[in-house]
């Protein structure tokens, strides 16, 4: 599956990159694709899912790399590799759920190439979409690419391709914001507002815009959390169901349970209602069961992967319960250890 011909653009500064993107955002030409790590884009280009006239390679733009603490919070450049997130002392100390999510992505080789910005902007995936041109042609194409039929939900006019990034549910639990830049300026939005929930138009990003950085607020620092991922193989594979959990330590107790899910909807989703599950008389089991029920009801998997929707929804339930019990049990153990020390 050879790549189609394209012109490679290699800016060295963010201003240069945004100018190049703006100059080529004309709808009369084929799309300009943005290359960050390339771990998802290049295979998709070989499958002829994208055949751009221009490829904007950002890898020389140093302004988009690095992790730093500022007055606004912890900022992560969009070109920061997933491996850097995994190993960052700042993130491992203050935002552990994000480092766990980054560590779960594919293999070390992929994490060395893949970026946080690329993971946030990851294209939605479907069994009927992520195939070769010959395979898709034999099926009459689909609503996401070249056709007008959704094989997942026949008769519907919505694309249900699933979003499969690992870091966004963790970022949602941390109330992360993103900065989006263009030649005319920047805008900052909550990550939760970035996704549309529509598989073939899944993000609110104009052709002349780039995601430039991620901002983790100070008030999310120190959240306890974990990330659980279901996949067929232990490396390489995208999640077929993913769960991120965070909880805040407060006055010796836990409050603010937040739960994000991925790979079972056309967007990563922050599950609603979880903050009401923890009360003074709640048992660990009751909190975990309640969170698992909410997550399973929020998940809307369809036949976008090789496994059945029912099984993926059940794995969301199982992984949510395990993750909540793990975090609550660790908190209880730490409280016990603190009392013994005193």
Image: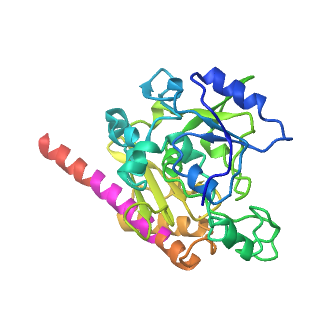
Could you tell me residue 333's position as x and y percent? 23, 53
Which residue sits at x=52%, y=55%? 260
Is the magenta region chiefly helix, strand or loop?
helix
Q: Is residue 120 visible?
A: yes
Quarter assignment of residue 197: bottom right
Q: Position of residue 26 (x, y in %)?
A: 83, 36
| Quarter of the picture holding the N terminus | bottom right
**Residue placed most toward the observer, 311 or 201:** 201
Query: Outermost residue, right direction?
Result: 28
Quadrant for residue 120, please give it.
top right
Coloring applied to the structure? rainbow
Would you say 20 lies left or right of 309 here? right
- Please indicate, yes or no, whether residue 95 appears anywhere in the rendered image: no
The answer to whether residue 215 is left or right of residue 232 is right
* Span shown in magenta: 316-331
- In the rendered image, the vertical position of residue 22 relative to residue 273, given as above or below: above
Magenta-colored stretch includes residue 327: yes
**Residue at point 72% right, 24% down?**
183
Q: Quadrant of the C terminus?
A: top left
Residue 319 is a magenta residue:
yes
For the point 31% across and 34% down, the residue is: 89
Q: Residue furthest left?
A: 341
Q: Position of residue 261 (x, y in %)?
A: 53, 58
């Amino acid at each position: 599956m050879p790549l189609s011909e394209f012109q490679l653009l290699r800016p060295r500064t963010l201003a240069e990159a945004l100018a190049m993107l703006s100059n080529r955002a004309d709808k009369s030409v084929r799309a300009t694709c943005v290359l960050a790590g390339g771990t998802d884009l290049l295979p998709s280009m070989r499958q002829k899912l994208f055949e751009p006239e221009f490829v904007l390679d950002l890898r020389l733009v140093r302004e988009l790399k690095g992790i730093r603490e500022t007055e606004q919070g912890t900022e992560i450049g969009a070109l920061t590799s997933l491996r850097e997130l995994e190993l960052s002392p700042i993130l491992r100390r203050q935002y552990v759920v994000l480092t766990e999510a980054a560590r779960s992505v594919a293999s070390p080789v992929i994490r060395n190439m893949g970026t946080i910005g690329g993971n946030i902007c990851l294209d939605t995936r479907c069994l009927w979409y992520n195939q070769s041109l010959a395979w898709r042609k034999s099926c009459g194409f689909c609503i996401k690419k070249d056709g007008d039929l959704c094989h997942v939900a026949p008769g519907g006019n919505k694309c249900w391709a699933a979003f499969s990034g690992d870091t966004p549910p963790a970022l949602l639990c941390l109330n992360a914001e993103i900065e989006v830049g263009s030649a005319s300026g920047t805008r900052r939005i909550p990550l939760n507002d970035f996704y549309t929930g529509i598989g073939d138009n899944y993000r609110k990003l104009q052709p002349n815009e780039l995601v430039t950085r991620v901002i983790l607020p100070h008030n999310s620092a120190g959240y306890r959390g974990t990330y659980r991922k279901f996949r067929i193989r232990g490396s390489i594979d995208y999640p077929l169901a993913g769960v991120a959990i965070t909880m805040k330590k407060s006055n010796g107790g836990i409050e603010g349970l937040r739960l994000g899910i991925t790979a079972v909807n056309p967007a990563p989703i922050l599950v609603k209602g979880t903050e009401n599950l923890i009360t003074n008389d709640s048992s660990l089991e009751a909190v975990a069961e309640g969170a698992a029920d909410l997550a399973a009801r929020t998940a809307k998997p369809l036949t976008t992967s090789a496994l059945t929707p029912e099984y993926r929804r059940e794995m969301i339930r199982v992984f949510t319960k395990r993750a909540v019990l793990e975090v609550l049990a660790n908190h209880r153990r730490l409280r016990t250890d603190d009392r013994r020390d005193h």
